[in-house]
Amino acid sequence: MNILYTNFHRGSGGGHDTYITSLVARSPHNVFVACPPTSSLYRTLEQQRFSNLFPLSFPGKLKELPAVIRNVRALSRLIDGYEIDIVHTNGSPDNRLALYARMLCTRKFRTVLTKHNSFPVSGRVSRWRFLRANDAVILVSHSVTQTLGFPVSAPGVHVIRNGVDTRWWQPPDETDAPVSDRLRLVSIAGTAPYKGWHYLLRALALLPPAVRARFSVTIAGHTPPDERLRRLCGGLPVEVTFTGFLSDPRPLLAKSDIGFVLSDAVETISFACREMMAAGLPVIVSDFGGLPENVTAGTDGWIVPAGDERALAALLTCISRMHARDIAEMKRSARRKAVEEFDISQMVGATNQVYASLT
């Protein structure tokens, strides 16, 4: 089959980018990608010398009507010219344009929509498009089914949880793992406010100095602006290292003990959480969205109420008293969970089954 993946993000697409590049790299089909030329996805695929890459934007506002018409025509030409069988969309803007393209295309094609966020689907038109206009819908976590605003029982709706490459994300050999008298907390989920990293910093500030000294904190991502730090944390209440952008965070994870993703909005399943667990780190997660689906509390991670820094402080106090061998066992459990449940092959296989069901 000829599969066209679309992504509407004009800049960084975060997990959308990871999702699409993972499917593209492992697809048994002829694959194409259309996305804005300003996007990080476009730059990534261009650097990888991916040949079937097309610059295309997906405007959706009424004031952008001329651009909508222009890009629908361009998308229609792409679909007809390359005999696309399935357009796999990843958000409302690109999904709408793909459905509009049906009115112009001479070629009959199927549409798949992956829902990556936890926003409700509101309004009759949106619900019709979601459940009736598309040939299949993929939800990236079970939690998404609870946030739609209506029950989902249609045969074309599939829950396929995001997967990670467990051969790429690996823990260090235990004999090579560095020894430290501090517990090294790390996040590779970025520094967007909704990722909840500030709750960890505020929780650490609540701890007695002797307990707080048991931890170090490193966050992969750019240092937030001072204004945001003041708004979220009142400044920086504890010492933390922001690494800036890391193209390969594995060396950082190899020197860490415990991961954290404490989102309070948007999050569905979190590639970052699953990547850290594959790298052999137990992860502290909030109870928001699909994050708890990743963790067996007390075995390969911990679950805390979203935004509750006092509960988080109490948990950190308990963790500070844990024996090194217990932390090591949780690391092994996290890696085992990732290999058994999160491996990318499961996501790719299930997605290809969806495609096969549409032929």
Image (tube, helix red, strand yellow):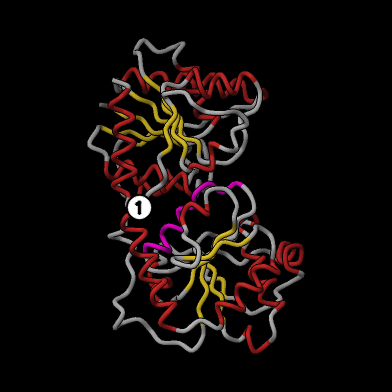
- In the image, residue 37 lies in the stretch drawn in magenta: no
Q: On screen, 95 above or below 263?
A: above
Query: Which residue position holds label 1?
Result: 341
Residue 106 horizontal side relative to residue 219, left or right:
left
Residue 78 horizontal side relative to residue 211, left or right:
left
Label 1 Cα neighbours within 10 Å, binned few <14 / some 14-19 / many ≥20: some
- Give the secondary structure at mark 1: helix
Residue 313 horizontal side relative to residue 43, left or right:
right
Q: On screen, 206 above or below 7?
A: below
Name the residue at 52% across, 59% down.
Answer: 189
> Between residues 221 and 64, which one lies in front from this camera angle?
221
Residue 78, quarter of the rendered image: top left
The percent position of residue 108, horizontal first and vertical second, equals 35, 13
- In the image, residue 268 lies in the stretch drawn in magenta: yes
Name the residue at 32% across, 29% down.
Answer: 3
Task: Name the amino acid, label 1.
Answer: Glu
Name the residue at 36% across, 10% down.
Answer: 106
The percent position of residue 357, horizontal first and vertical second, equals 30, 24
The percent position of residue 207, horizontal first and vertical second, equals 69, 80
Residue 75, quarter of the rendered image: top left
> In the rendered structure, which segment of residues is drawn in magenta?
266-278
Quarter occupied by the N terminus:
top left
The percent position of residue 135, horizontal first and vertical second, equals 41, 21
Overall secondary structure of the magenta section: helix
